Amino acid sequence: MQRQLLPRQVDARKLTGTDVQVSGFQPVSEFPRFVAGLHDAAGEVDVEMHFFRDESWVHRISASLSTNVSVICQRCLKAMPLSINSSFELGIVWTEEQAKALPRGLDSVILGEEPLDLLPLVEDELIIGTPYTNYHPVGECHPAGPVEYGEPEVGEVERENPFAALKDLKSSD
């Protein structure tokens, strides 16, 4: 079976009324807010969404996503791989009052008559699923140590150490 791109917009009311599964992938580069926290924009995000009405007739989305991306290790400042796997549940409503009536723990998506834009929902979950700081496992990265200054290269000007005068003061005691 051939993989398909995730649809950008769907008619959520129609999909929840007919109990439909939607799945697809999207390039990581399509999520600019998410990419801003990454080392690069390589990779794809796999998404599965189930649109349905629960036993209380609440319009719902049950979704999961997974991706492998490259983030920056905060210890060595080099790229490191990160797997993100997330599941989330959303209630679809059309007014603020309906959003307040949703069961606890169920986040809401408030729609008007317009179609539901799926990419911002997925991007929000990607951002939530990404750790704030990332580190290689202990022993796998080597933080940059102090800078060592060697002999000047050919054509480089050797500068006098501004603290050299202190050395003369100390020896005169």
Image (cartoon, helix red, strand yellow):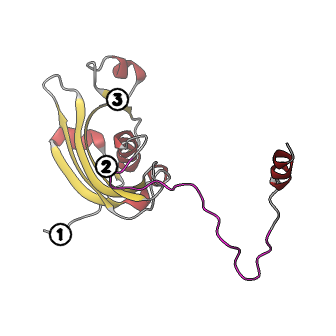
Mark closest to the chain's N terminus, 3 or 2: 3
Measure how far apart labels 3 and 2 are at the Cα level: 37 Å
Residue at image mark 1 = 2
Q: Magenta span: helix, strand or loop, mainly?
A: loop
- SS under mark 3: strand
- Nearest the camera: 63 or 10? 63
- Nearest the camera: 91 or 173? 173
| Label tally | 3
Q: Position of residue 123 (x, y in %)?
A: 39, 47
Classify mark 1: residues with Cα within 10 Å, few (<14), some (14-19) or many (20+). few
Left or right: where does residue 10 sit relative to residue 165? left
Q: Position of residue 162 (x, y in %)?
A: 83, 55
**Residue 115 visible, this orientation:** no
- Nearest the camera: 27 or 36? 36
Classify mark 3: residues with Cα within 10 Å, few (<14), some (14-19) or many (20+). many
Q: Position of residue 133 (x, y in %)?
A: 43, 42
Mark closest to the chain's N terminus, 2 or 1: 1
Left or right: where does residue 168 sit relative to residue 52? right
Looking at the picture, which amino acid does disc 2 mark? Pro
Residue at image mark 3 = 108
- SS under mark 2: loop
Measure how far apart labels 3 and 1 are at the Cα level: 32 Å
Residue at image mark 2 = 137
- Nearest the camera: 49 or 165? 165
Classify mark 2: residues with Cα within 10 Å, few (<14), some (14-19) or many (20+). few
Is residue 151 within the magenta segment?
Answer: yes
Q: Quadrant of the C terminus?
A: top right
Span shown in magenta: 135-158
Q: Position of residue 60 (x, y in %)?
A: 24, 33
